[in-house]
Amino acid sequence: MFNKIVVKRALKRTWGLDNNPRLIANNPAVNQSSVISQMIYDIFGGEILKTRKKKGWHFYNRINGERVDFLKSEMRKSSESNSFEDLPCTPDETNIYFSQEDYSNFFTRFIRAFEEAVGLNKYRTDLSV
């Protein structure tokens, strides 16, 4: 089940823990949006979409018919809602902006943060993970 509030909370925690300069070095907005949209797609399904912005492509998702963009504030999201092109995007397109190792590390941190956000971490038996 997809709960936007829980996912947003887990993403904030994940980015707060991230100190990997490779994910944000060249073009932070594209690198972050590509990693997040790919991970959301891998976990929750739906579609990856993209739109052209001044600094390059911006990636986001559509889940259950709703556009989901975790890098836009709610106010900007409503004021810019007409500026989304909603162009279909493949995982191969997002993958060019990050390495598989960086993605795996981000994915693992997100899963841990998500487990904490929904209270599943208390059921973890292996405390070394």
Image (cartoon, rainbow, N blue to C red):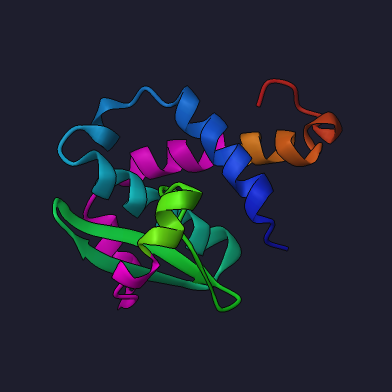
Magenta run includes residue 43: no
Q: Give the percent coordinates (x, y) of residue 24.
A: 26, 34
Q: What residue span does the magenta drawing correspond to?
A: 81-110
- How many marks overall? 0
- Residue 98 visible in image: no
Q: Give the percent coordinates (x, y) of residue 77.
A: 43, 57
Identity of the residue drawn at 37% across and 49% down:
35
Quarter holding the N terminus is bottom right
Q: Is residue 4 left or right of residue 42?
A: right
Identity of the residue drawn at 45% across and 38% down:
106
Residue 85 falls in image quadrant:
bottom left
Pick out the residue farthest to the right.
123
- Residue 12 visible in image: yes
Q: Is residue 126 left or right of residue 25?
A: right
Q: Give the percent coordinates (x, y) of residue 46.
A: 53, 73
Q: Give the percent coordinates (x, y) of residue 10.
A: 60, 39
Image height check: is 33 above or below 111?
A: below
Q: Is residue 65 left or right of residue 120?
A: left
